[in-house]
Image (cartoon, coloured by chain):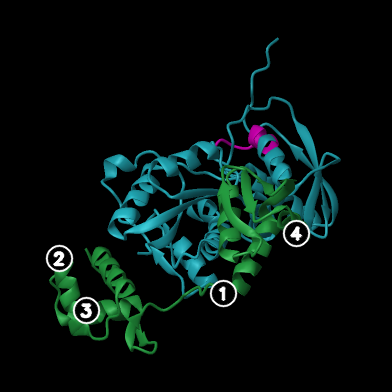
Amino acid sequence: MNRRRIVLAFAGDTRSCAAVKWLAESCRADVAALVVDVGQPDDLEEIRARAIACGAVRAHVLDRCEAFARDVIVPAAAAPAPPDGEALRRLPHPVIAAALLEVAAIEGANAVAYASTDQSLAEHIGAIDPAMNVIVPPAESPETSAVRAGGHLLLRPPAYTASEPAHVTIEFHDRVPVSVNGVPLGLRELIEILSLIGGEYAAATAEAPALDLLRAAYSACGGRGSITLQLHPAQPVPVNS
Amino acid sequence: MKARRQSAIVDIIHRSPVRSQEQLRRSMRKAGFDVTQATLSRDIRDLGLVKGGADGAYQAPPLHPRTPQNGQSLLHRAAADYLTRVDRVQQLVVLRTGPGQAQLLGVAIDAASLPEVVGTLAGDDTILVIARDTRRARALVKRFEQL
């Protein structure tokens, strides 16, 4: 007898782990877990091993950082209004939806699943393939959902606080950033560097300093040529004498 | 409960031909689900089951029909995205991918039903493809290098 096959977007949190078991038992399905790399700080190999330990028949890791940076972050930086709060955390959803459907096609799965109450991912899946079944396993009790994996390329990494003013030069080709301070970089590295630099100078409340820097650069030069931004420490920092 | 019940329905129609709702209701009762005709009708609609084939039995709609052609086009895409290196040792072909991607490419190779392939074994970033003989292994290497 053929069991149905379901591809689950797996983040490594307790809800994702519970979802593997729920799909396997309640839907009597073989679960293929998918870990989409969108630059989150987690150890993805460990998350993949966790999916297998929870009962997934296979677990795949797909690196979608470049697609995320190119198709989502760059347009968001050039858009008139910046994403904030929930919208910022949902930014990778179109990329994750596309990866889920790609893996579902290869796996021959007739359903995809994700473990979250957020409808946004289902909407992105429906926009690409309206015929695909989307399963959202029920949430387990609140006390077990405390551990959350997540984050993505754009969210602020832990940073030092700068004490001296500095400047950063961003160069664009065809409205796409291609180098920082004269060093040519791939989009993923470029955003990581801007997160680090921006994180040192941004206010403590800024969630995505790289996005703020890119937005400032786009508004100053329209995504053409190169632009130098002056950075000042967000808060005065005492300097040892 | 609904997911479990609907999953049982799918199992039953896969196992033997079911031509009427009454027959399905009896099979469900044997499987431990005592359901009304109305519930069954709803489930059949939810699952998108259709009557078809020469015997008029219920069938699940094939959402992603697997044909050799689309199997090969999926393999083409998967290889373009994930395959990084191809090696051959006699009739064994060793494929390399990024970490965590070998099984996905392995599934794509299996689904493409390549005539040269006897079987595949996928680990984390390496796939061992067993070809029928050395000559077919060479053909396989050529095929992967052209993908």
Q: CA distance from mark 2 to mark 1?
A: 36 Å
Identify which residue is drawn at 19% across, 81% down. Answer: B23
Residue with the mark numbered 4? B139
Image quadrant occupied by the C terminus of chain B:
bottom right
Instruction: Please tell me how crowded label 4 is: few (under 14), some (14-19), or many (20+) other residues with Cα within 10 Å.
Output: some
Chain A tint as drawn: cyan
Q: What range is drawn magenta here?
A: A197-204
Residue with the mark numbered 3? B24
Amino acid residing under circle 3: Leu
Callout 4–callout 2 Cβ contact below 8 Å: no
Residue B140: percent from left, percent from top: 72, 58
Identify which residue is drawn at 30% across, 56% down. Answer: A138
Q: Earlier in the sequence, mark 4 or mark 2?
A: 2
Amino acid residing under circle 1: Thr
Q: Nearer the viewer, mark 4 or mark 2?
A: 4
Q: At numbered mark 1, what does the secondary structure look like: helix, strand or loop? A: loop
